[in-house]
Image: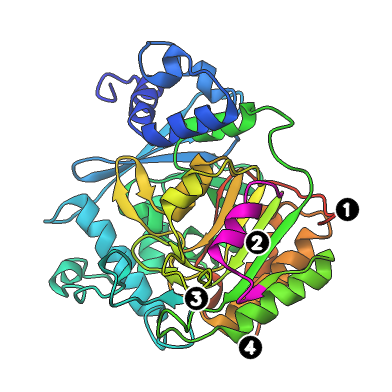
Amino acid sequence: MLAEGKVAKALFSAEQGRAQGLKDLMAHNYGLKLNDAESGKGNRSFHELSNRIPPNTIFMALGKNELVCWVCQKGKEVELRSNQISTHNKISTFFESLVELVCQEIGARDNVECEDRSLKLASDERLTVKRSPQDCRQIQHLHLQKSALNTFYEIVIDPTQDLFSGSELIFVPEGPLCLAPFAAFKGPNSRYLCESFRIRVAPSLSSLKMIADCPLDYHCKSGVLLVGDPWVQDVTELEQLPYAREEVETIGKMLGCAPLIGRQATKDAVLRRLGSVALVHIAAHGSMETGEIALAPDNGEMDFILTMKDVKRVQIRARLVVLSCCHSAHGEIKAEGVVGIARAFLGAGARSVLVSLWAIDDKATLEFMKNFYQHLVKGKSASEALNHAMNCMRESEEFGAVKYWAPFVLVGDNVTLEFAGCQ
């Protein structure tokens, strides 16, 4: 289709292959009936979908040796940009290596043993965070003359930036690009992308449309569930997270809500309240493989992991879910997107999810979330509050390093919360 100059039809075709299972889950929970175009059974014009897409939406696809980007702007024709990638490996391997190189350069893998919020359960293969070291040969072919963050900016942003307008960018990435820290992409002027734009991501264009089309009364307008530092030492060798405890206590004071902490933060207690609140915030240990979360056990029971299956069984009505845990953006990368805990929350009905790309420092995350909620309670949208928190941390002496402020990603809608009548 692209060879024939059918830019919009090519985008519509690529979109039909994205996040099909998630689309079905969202439609079921929202009570929406998929039309032929949305279910991939018809040939309707892309116009029907594009009317519900926010401006500055960049849909990305990996070609054989190129990154293809469609830029959608309201009321305008879809614009196409592509960038040839010089690599002897698969293009997906190139971007996997580039993401890994970012983590190495910024030190995201350094000093993350006891002081981070990673879930390490040697007895549970599903949740292990042990991986074989990155094969250095995978990144040797890059031969970068500049940093990985500069290279990302050059490949992704340079070809498309002349089409941007406004102050927000929405990326719909594919493959390993789902784990790229877009906010930290660094331009030739040494400015990070978050200095110029608010940023969020989406699994697909259809997921954005479904959130926009969901019933107005579907999501809760009040109610808060705060969970921090669940007691896990009876069932694991994990360290407790004192700053995670302080984090939810601080947020609780801002919102006038009592958090579930320590032994109170059981899986059963969380599941009972998960579907009846507008805001969910969980600060705990997270799995590197799936983002699944360690909660306190119920009466000595070993069933203490909040899994993707657990979340899918709950009809989530939260406008915002904040997973202040390590690797909460992670999961198996497939055509479906990243199949992990964040996708489970979106599929179960959450309007937006804030997640982390790598192991987050306990103390730094406390400061980040303080900044985030200070702006959220003032009526700022989630993407505005996130952007303010990033830039505030970036300018601080103690937590100015990229690894402290860049892992946080907003997935889904840009919500605004009402905190009056908090429960």
> Circle 1 — which element?
loop
Q: Residue 340's x, y, as percent?
A: 40, 53
43 left or right of 346 in image: left
Q: Are marks 1 and 3 in contact (CB under 8 Å)?
A: no
Sequence-wise, the earlier of marks 1 and 4 is 4
Q: Are marks 4 and 2 in contact (CB under 8 Å)?
A: no
Give the residue pinned by disc 2.
Answer: 387
Query: Of the numbered discs in the image, which one, if any, rests on residue 397?
Result: 4
Sequence-wise, the earlier of marks 2 and 1 is 2
Residue extent of the magenta highlight: 261-277
> Circle 4 — which element?
loop
Q: Residue 113's x, y, as percent?
A: 40, 87
The CA distance from mark 1 to mark 4 is 35 Å
Sequence-wise, the earlier of marks 1 and 3 is 3
On screen, residue 63 above or below 17: below
Sequence-wise, the earlier of marks 3 and 2 is 3
Residue 302 makes an appearance in the image: yes
**Residue type indicated by callout 1:** Ala
| Image quadrant where residue 236 sits | bottom left
Q: Nearer the viewer, residue 359 or 171?
A: 359
> Circle 3 — which element?
loop
Mark 4 neighbour class, 10 Å CA radius: few under 14, some 14 to 19, many 20 or more = few
The CA distance from mark 3 to mark 4 is 18 Å
Name the mark nearer the viewer: 2 or 1.
1
The CA distance from mark 3 to mark 2 is 17 Å
Query: Of the numbered discs in the image, which one, if any, rests on residue 420?
Result: 1
| Image quadrant where residue 135 sits | bottom left
On screen, residue 400 above or below 204: below
In the picture, the quarter occupied by the C terminus is bottom right
